[in-house]
């Protein structure tokens, strides 16, 4: 009985791979060339650098909103 179940799971796995192919390499590992410097980066590094920039911009926006709030409170 166990061998029949194993055989059925192998068939189901084969059908799943055939119907829904999934490539593990992903787009994150493609190389990207920086036109300005000529350096090559992996896509994941590029995404991380943009994430850091966005995080820094968000922090700066929060600081600016705080300063604006202080300025408007002082004007009242």
Image (cartoon, rainbow, N blue to C red):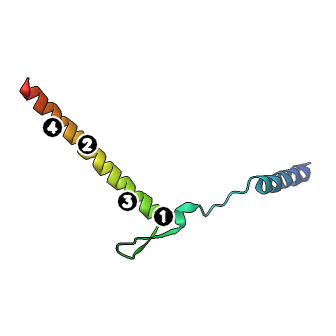
Name the residue: 11% across, 26% down.
73
Q: Quick one: label 3 or label 4, which is nearer the N terminus?
A: 3
Q: Quick one: label 1 or label 4, which is nearer the N terminus?
A: 1
Q: Give the quadrant of residue 7.
A: bottom right
* Residue occupied by mark 3: 49
> Do the numbered discs 3 and 2 sit on residues whose CB atoms are within 8 Å?
no
Direction from residue 76 to residue 5 in the image, left or right:
right
* Residue occupied by mark 4: 67
Measured as percent of width and height from the top left, residue 68 is found at 16, 35
Direction from residue 11 to residue 40 in the image, left or right:
left
Q: Quick one: label 1 or label 2, which is nearer the N terminus?
A: 1
Real-space Cα separation, disc 3 to disc 4, in angstroms: 27 Å
In the image, residue 7 sits, relative to residue 30, either above or below, namely above
Count residues near mark 1 (Cα–Cα under 10 Å), then give few for <14, some for 14-19, many for 20+.
some
Measured as percent of width and height from the top left, residue 16 is found at 78, 52
Real-space Cα separation, disc 4 to disc 2, in angstroms: 10 Å
Pick whichever, 71 or 55, lies toward us: 71
* Residue occupied by mark 1: 43
Real-space Cα separation, disc 1 to disc 2, in angstroms: 27 Å
> Do the numbered discs 4 and 2 sit on residues whose CB atoms are within 8 Å?
no
Real-space Cα separation, disc 3 to disc 1, in angstroms: 10 Å
* Residue occupied by mark 2: 61
Name the residue: 87% across, 49% down.
5
Direction from residue 68 to residue 8 in the image, left or right:
right
Measured as percent of width and height from the top left, residue 75 is found at 7, 27
Q: Give the quadrant of residue 33.
A: bottom left
Count residues near mark 3 (Cα–Cα under 10 Å), then give few for <14, some for 14-19, many for 20+.
few
Count residues near mark 4 (Cα–Cα under 10 Å), then give few for <14, some for 14-19, many for 20+.
few
Name the residue: 20% across, 41% down.
63
Q: Secondary structure at mark 4?
A: helix
Q: Secondary structure at mark 3?
A: helix
């Amino acid at each position: 009985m166990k061998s029949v179940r194993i055989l059925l799971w192998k068939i189901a796995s084969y059908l799943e791979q055939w119907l829904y192919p999934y490539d593990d390499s992903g787009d994150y590992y493609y190389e990207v060339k920086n036109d300005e410097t000529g350096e090559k980066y992996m896509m994941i590094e590029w995404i991380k650098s943009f994430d850091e920039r966005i995080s820094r911009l968000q922090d700066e926006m929060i600081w600016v909103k705080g300063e604006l709030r202080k300025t408007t409170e002082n004007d009242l």
